[in-house]
Amino acid sequence: MHADQLGNDAFTVQCPVCRATQAARPVCRRCNADLTLFTRVQASSRAARRRLAEAVAAGDHAAQARLRDYLHWLHG
Ligand SMILES: [Zn+2]
């Protein structure tokens, strides 16, 4: 099975307020916007995309449908 790699949460996000690109962090380095929820959504989206790729590789159609629904809900 897949390993939960340490440091996998280290990724960049773009601030939805001022569009500054930065490493995922709780507060925007430029405008001090609270990025906590935004970062969590991004992390959840990345995890769901990773699981979706695994479901496709495994031919798990039920999991693919569930994850696609989740990603659609997440991103509108
Ligand atoms: Zn910002």
Image: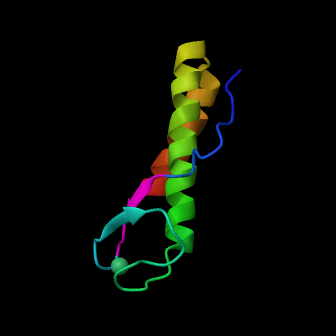
Relative image position of residue 59 (x, y in whole percent): 58, 13
Residue range corresponding to the magenta coloring: 11-16
| Residue 15 drawn in magenta | yes
Relative image position of residue 69 (x, y in whole percent): 53, 43
Q: Depth check: 69 or 30 in front?
A: 30
Name the residue rendered at 51%, 64% in the picture: 39
| Left or right: where 23 falls relative to 30 | right
Q: Depth check: 13 or 10 in front?
A: 10
Q: Is residue 11 above or below residue 26?
A: above
Q: Quadrant of the C terminus?
A: bottom left
Q: Depth check: 76 or 41 in front?
A: 41
Q: Is residue 48 above or below residue 32?
A: above
| Left or right: where 14 falls relative to 56 | left
| Left or right: where 73 falls relative to 15 | right
Relative image position of residue 57 (x, y in whole percent): 54, 15
Name the residue rendered at 51%, 68% in the picture: 25
